[in-house]
Image (tube, helix red, strand yellow):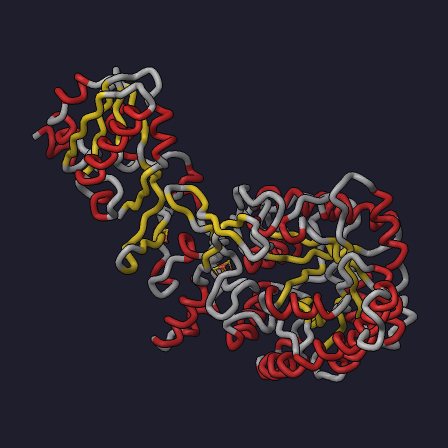
Amino acid sequence: MSAQDSNGYKSGGNLEKVLRGGYFAVTGELGPPQNADGDHIRKKASHLRGVVDAVNITDNQTAVVRMSSLGAAFVAIQEGLEPVMQMTCRDRNRLAMQADFLSAYASGVRNMLALTGDHQSFGNHPTAKNVHDIDSLQLIRMLRDLRDEKKFECGEAIKGQEPRFFIGAAAAPEAGPTEYRPYRLAKKVEAGADFVQTQLVYNVEAFKKFMEVVRQLGLHEKLFILVGVGPLKGPAMARYMRDFVPGITMPDHIIERMENAAANIPKEEKNARNQAWRDEGIKVCIEIIQQVRDIEGVAGVHVMAIEWEEAVRPIVDGAGLLPRPAVD
Amino acid sequence: MIVGEQKPLEEIKGFLDGSQKVLVVGCGTCVTVCFAGGEKEAQILAASLRMSTALTGAPKEVTDVTVQRQCEWEYLDLIKNEVQEADIIVSIACGIGVQAMAKHFPDKWVVPGLNTTFLGLPEEQGIWTEQCQACGNCILALTGGICPIARCSKQLLNGPCGGSEKGLCEVKRIKREHGLPVMQTDARGRKTPVIEDVDCAWHLIHERLKALGKLDMLTQIQPPKDWSTARDGGPRRIVREDLMLLDEG
Ligand code: SF4
Ligand code: SF4
C-alpha cells in the first residue's frame, strides 16, 4: 500500500472519500469548449453539480483543440465541482506533464486520469507531430512516484509540496486482444492506479466475462472500478458505435430498442422522434447501470453524456443514486 | 533497407527553373532494390524530364548516371566529370545520398528526386513496410522481434492501447503514391482519399509471445524510454577510433 497523507487519504479529494467510504460512486464528464469562453464550462457545470462525485475534464478529446484540461479544471473548481483532470500522452512530454501536475495540484485538482490519447489523425490537426514520450502505464507510475516517493520522473527529489493525486486509469475491456485486457489492467494496478474508468459498456455480458478474470486476479480489491456508461441519442448513434468505435460492441437488442422507440411516430415529427429516442437512450442507460451495479467488484459508474450534460441528472436519479453522499 | 519513393514529376520539374543542363544521379543500392532510384529509374526520370520540358517549349538537356552507392565518397569521385558538366543535380538516392552529393560537390546545386520514406522491408512483391526508426537502443528482445517504436502509431512500450481491434490499429493511413494522397470518388460523388488499414503492432507482439509461450513478458512494466539515443538527443554520430587508426596505418 502506498503512502497516505495524515488524514489517511492519498489525495483527500471527494472521489477518493466517496469510494473509500464504500459508496457507489458516480463520475461525469465535461468537455471543454473549442474557444476561450469560461461561461461554457459554467453552464455545463450547472447540470452536473450535486449529481456526480467528480467530473472528468477531457484533454483535447478526439484530438480536437480545446481549452486545456488544466484551465477548464480550474474553472470547474470555481464552480464547486471536483475535477478528474485528464492527461493524454499525445500532446505533452514528461517535462510538460509534470509541470502541469504541479500547477494542477496548486490549483486544487486532486484526481488525475492517465490516458494514451486518441491519435491526432482523428482530430482537427491531423498533420501535427505527436509526442508519446511516455505511455499511459509509465504516466501512472510517474504520478505515483511524484506522490509517494516525492520524486520527479528523473529521480530528483521534490523539495516542498508534492502533487498528491488520486490516480485514475482507463480500461477498454472489449478492445483487442480481449484476453489480454484484464492483464493490462493488472499492470496499471501495479503501476499505481487507484481507480479505473472503463470504455462505454453496452454489452453487459461481455463486461461480466472481463470482470470474472479481473476478480480471479484480485484486481477489484486493489483498485476501484467505475464502469463507463452513456445514453444513446438514437439508433444512428448506436449503429455508429457498433461500426466505427474501437473497443465497443453494441448488442443487437439495444439497436432494436432504439429503432423501435420512435417506430410509431411519423417521420415528419422530427422533434417527437428525437425526444422518444432520447428518452429510450436514458432508459437503456439506467438499466445498464442497474445491471453493472450487481456485478461483484464494480465500485461505481462513469456517465459519459457527450455534449448532453442535461441527461446526467435523470440518469443518476433514475438509477436511484441521488442524492450523492457528502463524506468528510 | 532504406525505402524511398520518387517525388511527383511536377515537383522535380519545379526545381529545374533557371538551369539548363540537368544530371539525374541514381544509386545502385537500397533505392535500386525498392525500384525508386536505381539505374532504370534514373533513365526513365531523365527521359520524362527531357520530354516534358520539351513539351513546354523550353527543352532542357537531361542526362543520367548511376553510382554503386551515393553515400560513399569513392563512388562519387567516379562521376566528377558528369557532375562538372551539369548546372543542377537531381539525386534520386535517399536523403543520405543527396547530402553526400551536396557535400562532395560544394559548388553544385543538388536537389532531391525522391522522398526517403522509411527503413523497411519488402513485405511481399510491391509492398514495403516500415520496421525500424533507428532509435539507437534496440528493444526487440522485449517485444518478440516486433518493433513498437516503428510500428505502433503511438510508440507504446506497454501496449496495446484501447484502439486495437481485430488486429488493426485505430489509426488508418491515407494511401499515397509519390507522397500524394490517392483519391477516390465516393457514392455521393465527392473526392475522398483512399484509406488503408494498419496492423496493430501490439496485437502482433501479443500473438507472437503467446505462440512462443512467453506471454508473461507482457506483465513487466517497461519504464520510460531513454530517447537521448534517438534523434531527440541531437544529430547522432559514431566514432570508432580503432578504425580511424587502421586507416592511418
Ligand atoms: S527498437 Fe529501435 S533500433 Fe530496434 S527496431 Fe525498433 S526503432 Fe529500430
Ligand atoms: S492500436 Fe495498436 S498499434 Fe495502434 S496505437 Fe494502439 S497499440 Fe499502437
Residue at horizontal 32%, vertical 53%?
B128
> Would you say B43 lies left or right of A164 here?
left
- Can see residue A37? yes
At 76% from the left and 48% from the top, the residue drawn is: A32
From the top left corner, tell me how far across and down residue A23 is, in percent.
82, 74
Q: Is residue A23 visible?
A: no
Q: Position of residue A135 (x, y in %)?
A: 54, 55
Residue B203, image x and y in percent? 45, 67
User: Is A243 situated above or below B15?
Assistant: below
**Against B63, is A125 above or below?**
below
Report the front residue among A115 and A215: A115
**Residue A11 vs residue A291, the one in the foreground:** A291
Give the quadrant of residue B210.
bottom left
Instruction: Residue at 42% x, 74% y: name it.
Output: B215
Quadrant where the C terminus of chain B sits is top left
For residue A22, what is the image quadrant? bottom right
Give the number of callouts: 0
Q: Position of residue B12 (x, y in %)?
A: 34, 30
A152 sits left or right of B103 in the view: right
Q: Is B134 located above or below residue B112 in the figure?
A: below
Q: Quadrant of residue A258?
A: bottom right
Residue closest to the eye, A48 or A16? A48
Relative to the observer, which residue lies in front, A137 or B167?
A: B167
Q: Residue at x 12, y 20 (%)?
A: B81
Q: Is residue A211 left or right of residue B198?
A: right
The residue at the far left in this view is: B249
Q: Is residue A20 above or below residue A67?
A: below
